[in-house]
Image (cartoon, rainbow, N blue to C red):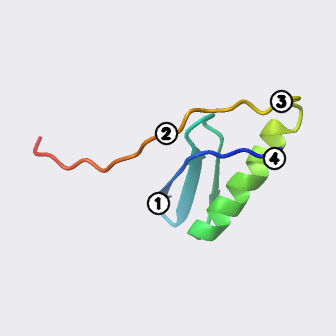
Amino acid sequence: MRFRGTAIIQREGDWFVATCLENCVASQGRSIDEAVANLKEALVLYFEDEADIPVYEPSYITALEMAV
């Protein structure tokens, strides 16, 4: 089975936090690569008991800049 999802990576202090937007699974690492690798491992565990991996519609991400 294959899962295609969208991850957002944010720096929090000395850590990078990677979160899958489709199901809110998150993990962290000291580098972006480590955070993504840990997120993939967390997703494997998340879907471990699933008979069918759900198909998610694509997420669209954009940056916003505005005066407040």
Earlier-in-chain disc, 1 versus 3: 1
At x 78% / y 38%, what residue is drawn? Answer: 46
The crowd level at tag 3 (other Cα within 10 Å; few <14, some 14-19, many 20+) is few
Q: CA distance from mark 2 to mark 3?
A: 20 Å
34 over 59 or under it: above or below: below
Earlier-in-chain disc, 4 versus 3: 4
The residue to which callout 2 is attached is: 59
Earlier-in-chain disc, 1 versus 4: 1
Q: Is residue 2 left or right of residue 11?
A: right
Q: CA distance from mark 2 to mark 1?
A: 21 Å
The crowd level at tag 4 (other Cα within 10 Å; few <14, some 14-19, many 20+) is few
> Quick one: 41 or 1, which is closer to the camera?
1
> Quick one: 2 or 22, which is closer to the camera?
2
Q: Disc 1 marks which amino acid?
A: Arg
Earlier-in-chain disc, 2 versus 4: 4
The crowd level at tag 2 (other Cα within 10 Å; few <14, some 14-19, many 20+) is few
The residue to which callout 4 is attached is: 44
The label nearer to you, 4 versus 3, is 3
Can you give x and y, in whole percent of width and height, for residue 40 in the image? Answer: 73, 54
**Quadrant in which the N terminus is drawn:** top right
> Mark 3 falls on what kind of element?
loop
The residue to which callout 3 is attached is: 52
Q: CA distance from mark 2 to mark 4?
A: 20 Å
Q: Disc 4 marks which amino acid?
A: Val
At x 75% / y 48%, what residue is drawn? Answer: 42
The residue to which callout 1 is attached is: 11
Q: Disc 2 marks which amino acid?
A: Ser
Q: Is residue 29 left or right of residue 59?
A: right
